[in-house]
Amino acid sequence: MNHLFRHDALVLDIPSDICRVTADRLRFSQVISNLVSNAGKYSPPGSTVKITSNECPTMVEVDISDSGIGISKEDQDMLFTKFFRSENELTRKEPGTGLGLYITKHLVEGHGGSINVGSELGKGTSFHLTWPKAA
C-alpha cells in the first residue's frame, strides 16, 4: 500500500515498504533537493510537485514531476551539460549557474544509477531516476 502525503504543493507517493538504495545519504538528498527545488522554481504558484517511487528487480525508481513551464526538446538535449542555461525568458528570470543538473547527473551516475528527463513546453517536466537497491 502506498502512503500519499500532501504538504502545500509537494505530494509524496512512496510505498511504505520501499527498500533502501545504495547511496551516500548526503548526495542522495542533494539530488532530490535540487530536482524538487528546480520543479518549484519553474512552476507557477499553486502548482503541484510530485515525487513517486517504486521498486524494480535491482533498482529503485524515483520520479519527480511538475506542471511548470516545461523544457523544449532542444534544451532537453543540453540539459545535463556544464553551465547550460535555457534561453527561455521564463527560465532566465530565475538565478542559477547551470551547474545543478550537471552535478545531479554525475552524482546519480556515480552511484550506479541513471537520470532522464521528459518534458513538454507549457505542460511540465518529469525527471526519472534509478538507484541501485541496497543489498
Image: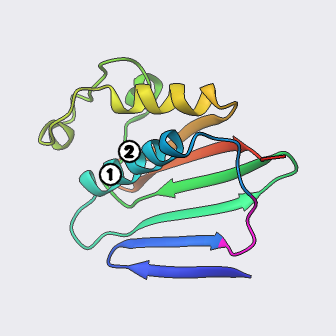
- Please tell me which residue lies in front, 42 or 26: 26
Query: Marks 2 and 1, Cα distance to the nearest angstrom?
Result: 5 Å
Residue at 15% of width from left, 36% of height from top? 92
**Magenta-highlighted residues:** 15-19
52 displayed left or right of 96: right
Residue at 34% of width from left, 73% of height from top? 9
- Please tell me which residue lies in front, 42 or 74: 42
52 displayed left or right of 17: left
Amino acid at circle 2: Asn
Q: Badge 2 is on which residue?
A: 34
Position above or below: 73 against 39: above
Q: Main secondary structure of the magenta part?
A: loop
Percent x, y for residue 130? 67, 43
Tell me the SS state at disc 2. Answer: helix
Residue 16 lies in the magenta-colored region: yes
Percent x, y for residue 37? 32, 51
3 displayed left or right of 76: right
Percent x, y for residue 100? 35, 32
Q: Badge 1 is on which residue?
A: 37
- Please tell me which residue lies in front, 70 or 9: 9
* Structural crowding at the residue carrying mark 1, measured as other residues with C-alpha within 10 Å and reported as few (<14), some (14–19) or many (≥20): few
Percent x, y for residue 19? 76, 60
Question: Disc 2 vs disc 1: Cβ atoms closer than 8 Å?
Answer: yes
Residue 83 lies in the magenta-colored region: no
